[in-house]
Structures are given as structure tokens and as C-alpha cells.
Image (cartoon, rainbow, N blue to C red):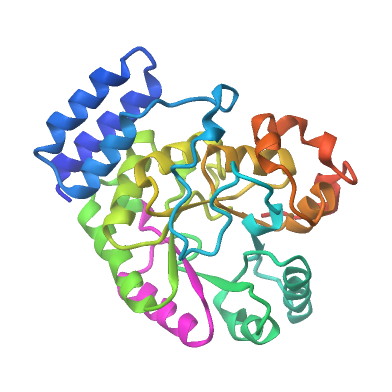
Amino acid sequence: MTEAELEGLAEEIVARIQSGRKSVDSTRADAQTRSGRQGSVVRGALALAAAPVASPASGVLADISWRGPNVMKAAWTPAVGARRVADFVDHTLLKAEATRAEIVKLCAEARQHRFAAVCVNAGWVELCAKELAGAGVAVATVCGFPLGATTAHAKAAEAAEAVANGADEVDMVMAVGRAKGGEWAYVEDDIGAVVEASRRAIVKVIIESAALTNEEIVKASAIAKEAGAHFVKTSTGFHGSGGASAEAVRLMRLVVGDDLGVKAAGGVRDCATALAMIAAGACRIGTSSGVGFVTCLGPGPLPLAELLERPQAHGAACTSGTCVQAGGGQY
């Protein structure tokens, strides 16, 4: 993807989100004009940019076009039927001082609640793979974490070792400084090296969205897609600029469309926030508060689409009403 293509993509999508004044027909015409000059990734994103951007209150949940491919382990269609909130959760423990006993407990909770995955540092992957054998819960790990400032070779080696030890998913940190400096070819090669090294594993690219401008979020998401990643992810949860936001999730989903997953992580500690992220287009939530979500919303399927219409009113469906206290997480 060339610099000109990236610039055109970013301008088109950001303008579409920030300005509700331009008609859909006019935006679509612009997209079609530009699509003749740009690659398939750009054309797909511009087509999405030309679609109406609705708020949850105006029926966006009736549109499930962002549901994604079935090869990913996630609840992709929350707007249709009943869904378990646990299906969205990557049960996460990434603090440096995590002990073996805490990791075993994490896995036991994930097995009990049938979370989508656990997410741990690479040194615990082999243990998690053993603890979760046959549980139907994926083992996710991180590489280049939390700065993304190591070399592509180091990230690839880290990913390859993790997969060999039993990791099903690799959450890699993008080269954030290179992205901020406009070195997008480097960013693409960096991601591509991890995708290649990860072989069968799903690769999620952490773009550290709170540290990026809207234009940079668009470019980073498009580059992740171009490089062969399977997800884009908002945040490490360790950056000083903050964690996930519904606005960033919505923008990322608009760029990657139906082809990639979107994971919201960093500061998602209560049900209302989690539901807002899902309503914006997230199909995974990285959090240490997943047990709290299940305690609050209940373990079984529920009419999630109704809750997504008004995430702040989720208390009506709670069994405990104490999701924040029950979670007790920092991630």
C-alpha cells in the first residue's frame, strides 16, 4: 500500500466520521472515483466509509455486516439472538508479578466460564496450554510487549517460540514510534514478520490507539489488514495515553470491515464499558474483569442486542449489580 493510498484512505474515513453533513451518495461517488486509482484494501475500506454511520439509538444493531469470518473464535453477531458475554472475553493477566498460582486460577476461571481465551505473558503459555487442554479456551500471549520497540526479528522469534509452546493467538505490539514517524512500510514489514512466524496462530495487532490521531488509527488498521493480521486491537493497557475508547473501536471496525476482528483492551473494567465497546464493533474484550461481567450479567445467553442499545442501563439484567467490584481487575 502506497503513501498516497494511505493518505486517501485516512482522509476519506476520518471525514466521513467527523462530518455528518456530506450525503451518503456524494461520499460513495467520491469513493468510487478514488477506487479506480487504489488497491483492493483501500477500495474495501472506502466502500465502508461510504455507508451511513449510525448511532446505536438509530438502529445500528440491526446491521451485522461487521460480524467477521467464522474462523475466529469470537461472538461475531451480538445483534442476532442471545449471546453469552463470556464469549467476548479474553481473560487477561499480564502484570509482571503474576505467580504460577494466579495463572492456574486464571485458567480455572476461563475453563469454568468458557471465556474465548486467556491472555498471558509468554513465560506462562506452556502452563496455560496444559491447564486448558480440551477446554475450548484459546491461549493468547503477547510479543513486543508493551512498547513495540523491539526489532521485527525479535518479535518474530518471540511469536514463533510462543506458538511452539502452545499459543493459539499472538497479540503483538505495533512499532508505534515508526507509525508516529510515518514509516508505514516498516510497520507493515514488522507485522508481516510476526504473521509469518506465527504460522497457524491468530495474530492481533495492538496499535495503541490512544496515542494515535484518527488518521493514524485508520492507517495502522489498514496496514495490519494488508500485512495479513487477523485482528486489530486498541491498546496494551500499559500506555500513559490511555486505553480503549468506543470511538477508536468504531473507526477500526470501519477500516477493517468484515475481514478482521477488533479487540478492545485497556480500561474495560465494567459491563457498561464492555457493552459500549461491543456496540461500537468489538468482538473481543481484553480484560481482567471477565468474572465480574459474568457475575453481573449472568453466565447464560441473554438478549445482548437489547443491552447494547443502552449500555449504561445494563443494571436491569444484572444478577448482582456489582460488576466493578466483582471484577477487581486492573487491565
Residue 242 visible (yes or no): yes
The answer to whether 237 appears left or right of 206 in the picture is right
The extreme front residue here reads: 81
Does 302 appear above or below 99? above
Does 93 appear above or below 317? below
The answer to whether 62 appears left or right of 189 in the picture is right
Relative depth, front residue between 25 and 323: 25
Query: Residue 170 location, x and y as percent?
Result: 47, 70
The answer to whether 78 appears left or right of 172 in the picture is right
Query: Residue 306 location, x and y as percent?
Result: 69, 35
Q: What residue is drawn where x is 65% and y is 30%?
A: 309
Query: Residue 74 location, x and y as percent?
Result: 56, 59
Relative depth, front residue between 8 and 68: 68
Query: Residue 148 location, x and y as percent?
Result: 41, 61
Q: Within the magenta stretch, is there residue 155? A: yes
The extreme top residue here reads: 21
Q: Within the magenta stretch, is there residue 325? A: no
Does 203 appear above or below 168? above
Dividing the image into 4 quarters, which one contains the C terminus?
bottom right
The magenta span reads 148-176
Residue 328 visible (yes or no): no
Q: What residue is drawn where x is 28% and y is 61%?
A: 227
